[in-house]
Image (tube, rainbow, N blue to C red):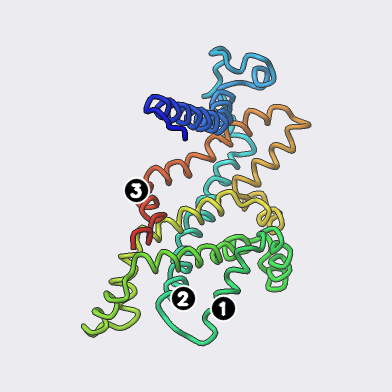
Amino acid sequence: MTTTTPTAAGGSRLTSRAVANTVVGLAALYTLLPAIWLLLASTKNADALFGSDIFSLGDFSLWRNLTDLFSMEEGIYGRWYVNSLLYAVVGALVGSLISVAAGYAFDKYEFRHKEKFFGLVLTGVMVPPTVLALPLYLVASGIGLVNTFWAVFIPVLFNPFGVYLARLLSSGYVPNEVLEASRVDGAGELQTYIRVSLRMLGPGFVTVFLFQLTAIWNNFFLPMVMLSDQHLYPLSLGLYTWNSSATVSPEYYPLVVIGSLLAVVPLIVAFITLQRYWKSGLTAGSVK
């Protein structure tokens, strides 16, 4: 029979901790390196961007790149930015309201074929968005919405994963006893949902909102299929067209780099501002 001495056990724990810290450090480095490169590359002109001195402090062209970015093609980048904010922020807000309401209904109410309908929702979660792009285009073409704002905005309002997540969050945040007490006090179902349930679902709503905001902000294939007018492009599609043009006109490369840097700012601001809500939303129901 063998025994493990306290010294050996302590050494084993230290080794395990060192291995874990090394893995975490490598993962963090892998994640941060592209961001660091993007930050440094946005300060370089086209010549320095393709040279070997991208990590040097010389050739600082950040302000010139910003000026060129917002003046190129009559300032169309600013239009793309506003379009992305409209598609993503307004779309995520309205879409989250729809998803939370649907998830709440699936959780708190009993109706015929409830689980079958929810099964269809889960099926929608498993279908890649790119598969739906062509059918959505045919529908939009049939009703005359192709190459309009609504061709991109309306489809992003309905998110099966948001409904699925909202049902889980509703079961964790809204006790049935509270709803029964509200009904006993004479409140109707809509009044109970707005005044009681929706307030309790605040962290869950923010969680769904952030997931939907990220998905819509990074949406690329649907706008590419639906839109031909550059003034309706979101940032993802607009920067893609500039990147394609850069093979012929290299002056677009610095603009694509700094445009990509500015494109991630709203997501960073949203996650930092709302982090205390979405963190609690992700743990809903864990200690129920």
According to the picture, the residue beneath numbered tag 3 turns out to be: 276
According to the picture, the residue beneath numbered tag 2 turns out to be: 106
Compared to residue 3, the image places residue 126 above or below, namely: below
Amino acid type, callout 1: Phe
- Farthest residue to the left: give it: 185
Amino acid type, callout 3: Arg
Amino acid type, callout 2: Phe
Determine the secondary structure under disc 2: helix
- Look at the numbered discs 2 and 3 and tell me whether their residues touch, using CB distance below 8 Å: no
Foreground: 256 or 145?
256
According to the picture, the residue beneath numbered tag 1 turns out to be: 117
Residue 77 placement, left or right of 137: left
Q: Position of residue 131 (x, y in %)?
A: 71, 61
Precedes in sequence: disc 2 or disc 3: 2
Precedes in sequence: disc 1 or disc 3: 1
- Look at the numbered discs 1 and 2 and tell me whether their residues touch, using CB distance below 8 Å: yes
Determine the secondary structure under disc 1: helix
Residue 126 seen in the current view: yes
- Farthest residue to the front: give it: 1
Q: Residues within 10 Å of mark 1 (few under 14, many from 20)?
A: few
Residue 34 placement, left or right of 6: right
Foreground: 12 or 254?
12
Which residue is drawn at the image coordinates 34% and 59% (left, top)?
Answer: 287
Compared to residue 90, the image places residue 143 above or below, namely: below
Q: CA distance from mark 1 to mark 2?
A: 9 Å
Foreground: 229 or 15?
15
Which residue is drawn at the image coordinates 56% and 66% (left, top)?
Answer: 160
